[in-house]
Amino acid sequence: MIEVTMYTTTTCPYCRNAKRLLDAKGVAYKEIDVRSVDVKNEMVSRSGRRTVPQIFFGNWHVGGFDDLAQLESEGGIDQVLNPRMAG
């Protein structure tokens, strides 16, 4: 199974939406709070972006919530995370 990692903050509505979408699909994820400068720098280094959420499927950078929602609308989350079970 591919590890899903999401960099978030507690006050971000897009982070809450991303967590809600993944929870509804039953996708487990590791949440990393970026309040620490070191963690925020790690996120920027990995993603090239400064906004949250930043979501990774393994080492693949999905992007933010809008990117995740687009991937879901195309059936891509299932294809990436469960390639044998997708359509």
Image (tube, helix red, strand yellow):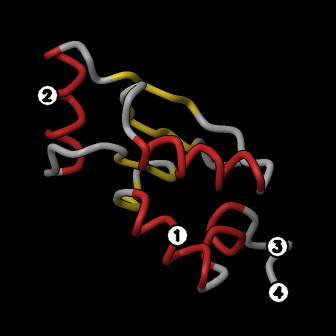
- From this view, report whether residue 6 is shown above or below residue 66: above
Residue in the image at 21% along x and 45% along y: 51
Say which residue label 3 marks.
84
Separation of residues labelled 3 and 2 (CA atoms): 35 Å
Name the residue located 53 percent from the left edge and 75 percent from the top edge. 71
Q: Position of residue 20 (x, y in %)?
A: 65, 47
* Distance between the alpha carbons at the discs numbered 1 and 3: 21 Å
Residue at the image position 67 percent from the left and 61 percent from the top = 81
Sequence order check: which comes first, mark 1 or mark 4?
Answer: 1
Q: Which residue is mark 4?
A: 87
* In this rendering, the label closer to the viewer, 3 or 2: 2
Marker disc for residue 69? 1
Give the Cα separation between the discs numbered 2 and 4. Answer: 38 Å
> Where is residue 52, by image quadrant?
top left
As displayed, is residue 8 above or below residue 27? above
Q: Disc 2 or 4, which lies upstream in sequence? A: 2
**Cα–Cα span, label 3 and label 4:** 8 Å
